[in-house]
Amino acid sequence: MHKRIKLDCGITVDIDRAPDKCPICNQAQLPANIFAKLTGDIENRKTKLELVMECMNLSCARFYISRYSKTHGTYNHNFKFDHSITNVFNAPNIGQEIVNTSESFEKIFTQASEAESKQLDELAGIGYRKALEYLIKDYCISIKPDKEEDIKSNQLSRVINNYVTDENLKNCANRAVWLGNDETHYVRKWENHDLKDLKILIQLTCTWIQSSILTKKYMDEMSRD
């Protein structure tokens, strides 16, 4: 639903919608608009609209900025929602089994997430791909310590196919590599999949690794012998 906003300069603009969740607490809600400002001349098609918003979740109640772009091809006063930004970064929750397996993965994945939160999506994709390599190789080294040098020096896809035996883990990890490679190469092979899909596949990879580690732990601890 379109909403009309009157700026301090006297100009009235229309936005297509308000943000539907707070980028700080991630709670779905309709925020309060505190202040609105244009980044340039209203007649310029490249002019942006920035709204200072207040989260209506009482346990959060923080301020953030929502950015809007002018609708394409017209010199009008209509703006379309782009994204919301904040100086607050919520670090991703990574399972302890994964952290114990690869501290480097935790560090790199967290940095990639922070880059993405700042709209640096081109850099974030490269970071996620690097984090994936550390996770897979550190995991394979943990189960095949005698093959450490081979695992470190080999291509990631070969490491997965040579040392990962669980089919669910192998399938998810391989697909994560495919999308991760797209983030680093000039030509994309998987045009219908993006950063969101890469993150889901990395999460699935983490889930299967965590499951494997916990399964082994309890099988070893609760042997019938």
Image (tube, rainbow, N blue to C red):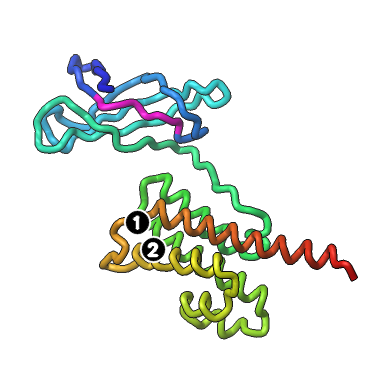
Instruction: Residue type at mark 1: give it.
Output: His
Q: Could you say whether the residue bearing mark 1 is in a helix, strand or loop?
A: loop
Q: Toward which corner of the image does residue 69 lie, by quadrant?
A: top left
Instruction: Residue type at mark 2: give it.
Output: Leu
Please check the rendered image and state whether residue 97 is part of the magenta-colored stretch, yes or no.
no
**Residue reaching furthest right?**
225
Image coords of residue 66 (percent x, y): 35, 31
Circle 2 is placed at which residue position?
A: 179
Question: Vertical placement of 175 versus 10: above or below?
Answer: below
For the residues bearing labels 1 and 2, Cβ distance under 8 angstroms: yes
Q: Residue at left 46%, top 69%?
A: 174
Circle 1 is placed at which residue position?
A: 193
Answer few, some or many: residues within 10 Å of disc 1's Cα (few below 14, many 20 plus, some between 14 and 19).
few
- State the residue in front, 211 or 45: 211
Answer few, some or many: residues within 10 Å of disc 2's Cα (few below 14, many 20 plus, some between 14 and 19).
many
Please report the bounds of the magenta region as a residue range. 15-22
Looking at the image, residue 223 sits to the left or right of residue 56; the answer is right
**Count of marks, rendered view:** 2
Image coords of residue 17 (percent x, y): 30, 26
Question: Vertical placement of 146 versus 178: above or below?
Answer: below
Q: Residue at left 25%, top 22%?
A: 2
Q: CA distance from mark 1 to mark 2?
A: 7 Å
